[in-house]
Image: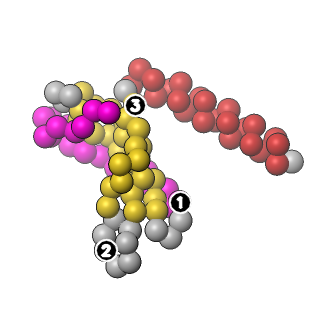
């Protein structure tokens, strides 16, 4: 997976933070990767006792060409889960 490089233009931007549990949250951020290309990163962060949130290795990086397909797939999965729960 591509690792972020130094900020080459666009700053990192937090888009959303979703609490997964008392010790974990999922953050969606826009970051520069591979020479400054802006991509969406979805990463799990964890907190150990009273410490600050720390990134885990669990993440996915999505380029703009695939982001809409991912969102559509997640919406479809959500609809299926709701219909199966009914």
Q: CA distance from mark 3 to mark 2?
A: 29 Å
Image coordinates of residue 57 in percent, x first then y, are 35, 48
> Does label 1 or label 3 sit earlier along the sequence?
1
- Judged left or right of residue 18, residue 13 is left
Reply above or below: 38 against 49.
Answer: above
Q: Residue at x 53, y 65 (%)?
A: 21
Image coordinates of residue 43 in percent, x first then y, are 40, 48
Image coordinates of residue 65 in percent, x first then y, are 41, 20
Displayed quadrant of residue 17: bottom left
Q: Secondary structure at mark 3?
A: strand
Question: Would you say residue 14 sits in the magenta stretch?
Answer: yes
| Local crowd size for mark 1, using a 10 Å CA cut-off: few (<14), some (14–19), many (≥20) | few
Q: CA distance from mark 1 to mark 3?
A: 21 Å
- Residue 20's disc is 1
User: Which residue reaches farthest bottom?
Assistant: 50
Magenta stretch: helix, strand or loop mostly: loop
User: Which residue reaches farthest right?
Assistant: 86
Residue range of the region highlighted in magenta in the rendering: 1-20
Which residue is disc 3 drawn over? 62
| Local crowd size for mark 2, using a 10 Å CA cut-off: few (<14), some (14–19), many (≥20) | few
Q: Secondary structure at mark 2?
A: loop
The image shows a total of numbered marks equal to 3
In what quadrant of the picture does the N terminus appear? top left
Image coordinates of residue 64 in percent, x first then y, are 38, 25
Which residue is disc 2 drawn over? 51
């Amino acid at each position: 997976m591509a690792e972020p490089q130094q900020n080459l233009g666009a700053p990192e931007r937090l888009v959303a933070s979703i609490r997964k549990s008392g010790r974990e949250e999922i953050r969606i951020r826009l970051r520069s990767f591979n020479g400054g290309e802006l991509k969406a990163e979805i990463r799990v962060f964890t907190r150990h006792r009273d410490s600050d949130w720390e990134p885990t290795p669990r993440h996915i990086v999505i380029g703009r060409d695939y982001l809409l397909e991912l969102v559509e797939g997640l919406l479809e999965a959500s609809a299926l889960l709701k219909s199966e729960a009914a």
